[in-house]
């Protein structure tokens, strides 16, 4: 089968939630109108007015293009929507957020139905779609041949990062990045809880906090270096012994400010355990060993 590098008529797109609608508009703006389908048909009406073709069923949408993109709530809804739909010869791109194991299983499922499969993890929120300056991108893993065949079409909504043939890799990267973000949000919540009832200009504080988090971000490179070299003391400037001591001050401040420390204490407990295991000269890389071994 010949695969175009750019679908002249746009892909088939199943799912018109906030993200699916943003994807559809990006392809419309690029002059490649998608054929769209959504469980609740009313969500397709504005897109039809903008030039999208609307399919009456999921099967009808899938039949309209070699490239089929699904962006649904979860993996279960992908299974429901595509149940009984003929995927023979199709290129299925799943932009639905899921786990690595779900991506592997969905890849097998698609291949059993005669389709090539690419999983995607969207590192963007809907307003960042179709806005290259926003820095949003989509992580892809699975069939490299599929990715290469459609890379121009896939690059329309957001930047593309292909991370490997194993279909699980996009979801693994996606969920790892989101997990790190969750920890950062926890720290931000605690910081604002400390200051919000004081004589502190919150916008000024936000500016300090953004600068501080940005300054600390390169810590990720020394963590990677420690894990690769196996030497967790390499280049350490703020050691665990000092940090654990400092944690007592953070906890006491929380108490003084009448703020619960429940977001901080699980991580602090792991730092204490690593110190007690005899690693005063490391930084926090050793906590990773406690989580995984
Ligand atoms: N929106 C965001 O900020 C994030 C950014 C990162 C990536 N996520 C993931 O993208 C997937 C879709 O998210 P969404 O924002 O479009 O989600 P909703 O607006 O809630 O739309 C959900 C669509 O899924 C359809 N749907 C749900 N269940 C079923 C089902 N059982 N059968 C058929 N369709 C189903 C729903 O249809 P309807 O309710 O309009 O009929 C919407 O089209 C998601 O994985 C995010 O994690 C977005």
Image (tube, rainbow, N blue to C red):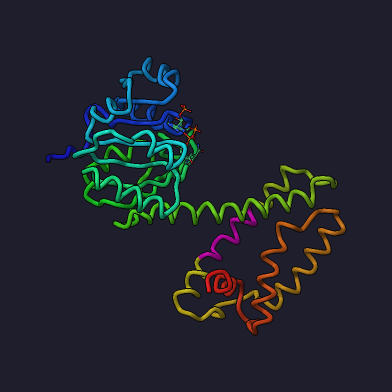
Residue 19 placed where, x, y %?
A: 45, 34
* Quadrant occupied by the N terminus: top left
Q: Dividing the picture into quarters, in which one does residue 80 lie?
A: top left
Residue 212 placed where, x, y %?
A: 65, 57
Extent of the magenta region: 211-220
Q: Residue furthest top?
A: 49
Residue 279 placed where, x, y %?
A: 63, 82
Q: Is residue 40 visible?
A: yes
Task: Please determine whether, in this image, residue 52 is positioned above or below residue 87.
Answer: above
Q: Residue furthest left?
A: 1
Q: Residue furthest right?
A: 256
Q: Residue furthest bottom?
A: 278
Q: Nearer the viewer, residue 260 or 217?
A: 260
288 relative position to 96: left or right:
right
Q: Dividing the picture into quarters, in which one does residue 251 lie?
A: bottom right
Measuring 58% from the left and 73% from the top, which residue is drawn there? 290
Q: Nearer the viewer, residue 40 or 284?
A: 40
Residue 108 placed where, x, y %?
A: 29, 51
């Amino acid at each position: 089968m010949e695969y175009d590098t750019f679908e002249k008529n746009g892909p088939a797109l199943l799912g018109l939630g906030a993200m699916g609608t943003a994807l559809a508009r990006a392809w419309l703006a690029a002059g490649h109108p998608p054929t769209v389908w959504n469980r609740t048909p009313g969500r397709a009406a504005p897109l039809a007015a903008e030039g999208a073709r609307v399919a009456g069923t999921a099967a009808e949408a899938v039949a309209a293009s070699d490239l089929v993109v699904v962006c649904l709530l979860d993996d279960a809804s992908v299974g429901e929507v595509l149940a009984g739909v003929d995927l023979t010869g199709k290129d299925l791109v799943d932009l639905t957020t899921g786990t690595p194991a779900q991506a592997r299983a969905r890849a097998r499922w698609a291949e059993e139905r005669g389709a090539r499969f690419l999983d995607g993890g969207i590192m963007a929120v809907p307003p960042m779609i179709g806005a290259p300056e926003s820095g949003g991108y989509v992580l892809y893993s699975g069939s490299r041949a599929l990715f290469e065949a459609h890379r121009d079409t896939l690059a329309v909504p957001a930047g593309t990062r292909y991370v490997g043939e194993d279909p699980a890799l996009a979801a693994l990267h996606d969920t790892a990045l989101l997990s790190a973000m969750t920890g950062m949000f926890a720290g931000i919540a605690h910081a604002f809880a400390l200051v919000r009832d004081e004589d502190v200009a919150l916008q000024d504080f936000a500016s300090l906090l953004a600068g501080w988090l940005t300054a600390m971000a390169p810590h990720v490179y020394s963590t990677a270096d420690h894990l690769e070299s196996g030497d967790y003391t390499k280049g350490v400037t703020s050691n665990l012994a000092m940090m654990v001591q400092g944690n007592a001050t953070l906890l006491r401040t929380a108490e003084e400010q009448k703020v619960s420390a429940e977001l901080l204490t699980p991580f602090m407990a792991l730092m204490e355990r690593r110190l007690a295991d005899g690693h005063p000269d490391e930084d926090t890389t050793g906590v990773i060993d406690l989580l995984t071994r």
